[in-house]
Image (tube, grey):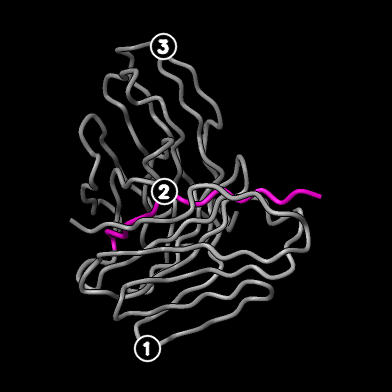
Amino acid sequence: KNQVEQSPQSLIILEGKNCTLQCNYTVSPFSNLRWYKQDTGRGPVSLTIMTFSENTKSNGRYTATLDADTKQSSLHITASQLSDSASYICVVTPATNAGKSTFGDGTTLTVKP
Amino acid sequence: DAGITQSPRHKVTETGTPVTLRCHQTENHRYMYWYRQDPGHGLRLIHYSYGVKDTDKGEVSDGYSVSRSKTEDFLLTLESATSSQTSVYFCAISDEGRWEKLFFGSGTQLSVL
């Protein structure tokens, strides 16, 4: 069964600090991995996509990494802001069926002033 | 939210009654999805559609049916609502292609009493 596991489940940091969120997956064959940000009471919004051949991709203060050999990804947030408080969801899409992406449970990040 | 409207935003109903949730898009995207989001489970796919009158089941489809008579509308029906169907329901859309960037609506909070 395809699985996506995220850690930690929740995280509290002070404004201005950096943090790293982890995503491990067993989805195979692999097509792509996305990180989504979900604000409270809203739907998720895509932050970045990683394909098999990509190791690192940045989107402003967000940097995602992918190690396709170990099936691990991370999302690094630099110089956190209060608006970064949200749930971050890792989603992996298999190459065989684009309609059947597997979602992680998410990491809830709280940034405190 | 990328031209996606979900209605209603909130719904309280009684066990055994039928309920229909509506998703309307203005993006002319081919694929439409219904997910439910529950604590500890992440987002789980209920049904999806890859065209008008073309639908397929997701991982948690029991007790749900869908219809898509127009490109822009995707309806989710709970045939006889149960308390286990209390959840937040998200509609999502995506464009053609296997990279599957999902655009989500704002969600419908459904409570079945």
Residue A6 sits inside the magenta stretch: no
The answer for which chain carries disc 3 is B
Q: Which residue: 25% across, 51% down?
A: B53
Of residues A47 and A86, which is closer to you in this image? A86
Q: Position of residue A68 (x, y in %)?
A: 33, 79
Q: Position of residue A31 (x, y in %)?
A: 30, 75
Q: Which residue: 22% across, 59% down?
A: A2
- Identify the image quadrant of residue B65: top left
- Circle 2 residue: A105
Region in magenta: A99-113
Tag 1: amino acid: Ser
Numbered circles on residues, count: 3
Of residues A91 and A15, which is closer to you in this image? A15
Residue A110 sits inside the magenta stretch: yes
Q: Which mark is residue B113?
A: 3
Label 1 packing within 10 angstroms: few (<14), some (14-19), many (20+): few
Per the image, label 2 sits on a secondary structure element best described as loop
Of residues B105 and A79, which is closer to you in this image? A79
